[in-house]
Image (cartoon, grey):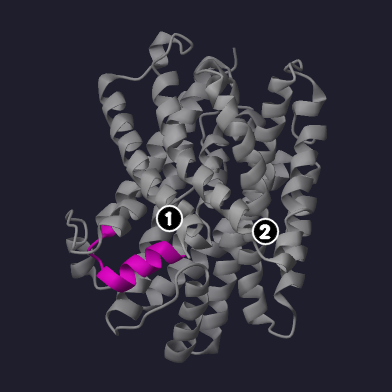
Amino acid sequence: MDEPPPRWRIIGPGLVVAATGIGAGDLVATLVAGSRFGYTLLWAAIVGVLIKIALVEGAGRWSLASGRTMFEGWRLAGRWTVVFFAPYIVIWGFVYGAAAMSSTALPLAALFPSVHLNVFAIASGLVGALIVWFGRYKVFEYVIAFFVGLMFVTVVGAAVVTVPNLGELVTGLVPRIPEGSLIYTLSLAGGVGGTITLAAYGYWLREKGWTTPRWMRVMRIDNSVAYVVSGIFVISMLVVGAELLYSSGVTIADGEGGLLDLADVLRERYGVFMSYFFLIGFWASSFSSILGVWNGVSLMFADFLGTVRGLAEDDPRRKIGGLYYRLYIVWLTIPPMALLFLGRPIGLIVAYGALGALFMPFLAVTLLYLLNSRHMPKPHRNTWWLNGILGIIAALFVALGANELVKAVAPLFSP
C-alpha cells in the first residue's frame, strides 16, 4: 500500500473549506464586535476558530475512517435527517444564491459606480458557475488559493496599516463578557467560518484523493493550518474594528454594507488607494464563497439525490461534473436572479432563516452520534474528551440556533 507523501502542501481541502466559510458576513460581524468592544472579544474569535477545527476534523475523520459521505452518515442517524435536509438544501440554495451574488457585487459596484449592482451580481453568479461547471477539482483548488492570497494581502494589510496596540491585543485573550455583549460573544465563537460548507469537507477530501485512514494525519494538519489562516483574517478584522472604529467612536452598518462603510473610513483616513485595496479583499472573500458553495454544496446535493434515488456509488450522475452536480449549480445561479429584481418574499426568507439557524446544531449533534456509533471503526471513534468538546459545541449551537430561530420568525408576528 502506498504511503501518503511525506511533504504536506498548504493548498488542500482545508483551505477550500476555510476560504468558503469566511465570507463578507463573517468579516463584518467581527468588525462590528471590534468597533463596539475593542479587543475584549478577541478570545471568543479564537474559540470560534478552534470550534471549526473540531467540527471539520470530525467531518473529515468520519469520511476517511468510515468510507461514507456525510449524507450517507446522516441517513444512518435516521430518516428524520432526510426530512430536514431535503427542504434545507433546496430553500437554502435558492436564497443563498441571491445573497452571495449580491454580496460579491457590492464591492464591484463601489469600485465601478456607473455599472448597476445587478449586472455585477448576475455576472458573478455566471462566472462562478462556469469555473466549477466542469468539475476540475485541482483547478478549483488553485483558484481558491489565489483568492485566499488576495484576502490575506488586503485584509491583513488593512490591520497592519491601522497599527494594532499589541498590549491591548494580549489582554483580549483573557475571557471576558462585557455588558451587552453576550450575543456578540456567542456569534463570534460559533458563527465565524462556515455553515453547510463545513459538512462539504469530506467531499473535497474525496476529490483530493484522500479517501482512507492513512490520510488522517495529513487531513488534521490540512484542517488546522487552514483554520489558523482563517483565524488570522478574523483577528485582522477585529484589529481594524478596534483601532479604526472603536477608538474614534465611528459606527458602521450591519451586514455587508458595513464593509462599504469601512472602505469609506479607510479612504478618509489613508487615501483612495487604501479604500480600493480593501474593496478588492471584500470582493475576494465574497467570490471565494460563491466558488466554494457552487462546488461543495453541489457535490453534497448530487450525493443526496443519488442516495435517495438508490443509484450506485459509481453512477456518474452523482459525481463531480455529473448531471445532479450541474443541476444544483443551475439552481444556485439562475432562479435566484429573480430575487435580485423582485425583492425577497417574506415567507421564503423566514423559512431560510429558520432552517439556517437549525443547521449548525444539526451538524454538531449528528457528528456526536456518528463518531460514537457502531458505523465508525473503533480506533477512530471519539474519546471521552472529544465527546466533551463536541457536547459543548452542540450546546453552543443549540443556544445560537434558538436565538437565530426567534429572529427568523419575528417578521411573521411584526405588524
Q: Is residue 373 above or below residue 396?
A: above
Residue 341 appearing in the image: yes
Q: Which residue is found at the position 62% from the left and 80% from the top? A: 110
Magenta segment, principal secondary structure?
helix
Side of 196 relative to 42 (left or right): right
The residue mark sitting in front, 2 or 1, is 1
Side of 128 relative to 289 (left or right): right
Residue 95 placement (x, y as % from top left)? 64, 53
* CB within 8 Å, label 2 to label 1: no
**Residue 93 part of the magenta-drawn span:** no
Residue 3 appearing in the image: no
Check disc 1 and report the residue beneath it: 407
Q: Is residue 137 above or below residue 411?
A: above
Q: Residues within 10 Å of mark 2 (few under 14, many from 20)?
A: many
Question: In the rendering, which numbered label is found on residue 56?
Answer: none
Q: CA distance from mark 2 to mark 1?
A: 20 Å
Residue 25 placement (x, y as % from top left)? 49, 61
Question: Most extreme residue toward the front, as rendered?
Answer: 415
Side of 330 relative to 263 (left or right): right
Check disc 2 and report the residue beneath it: 98
Dot placed on the residue nearer the N-terminal end, 2 or 1: 2
**Residue 29 part of the magenta-drawn span:** yes
Q: In the rendered structure, which segment of residues is drawn in magenta? A: 28-42
Q: Which residue is found at the position 67% from the left and 61% from the top? A: 101
Q: Judging from the image, what secondary structure is the residue with disc 2 in?
A: helix
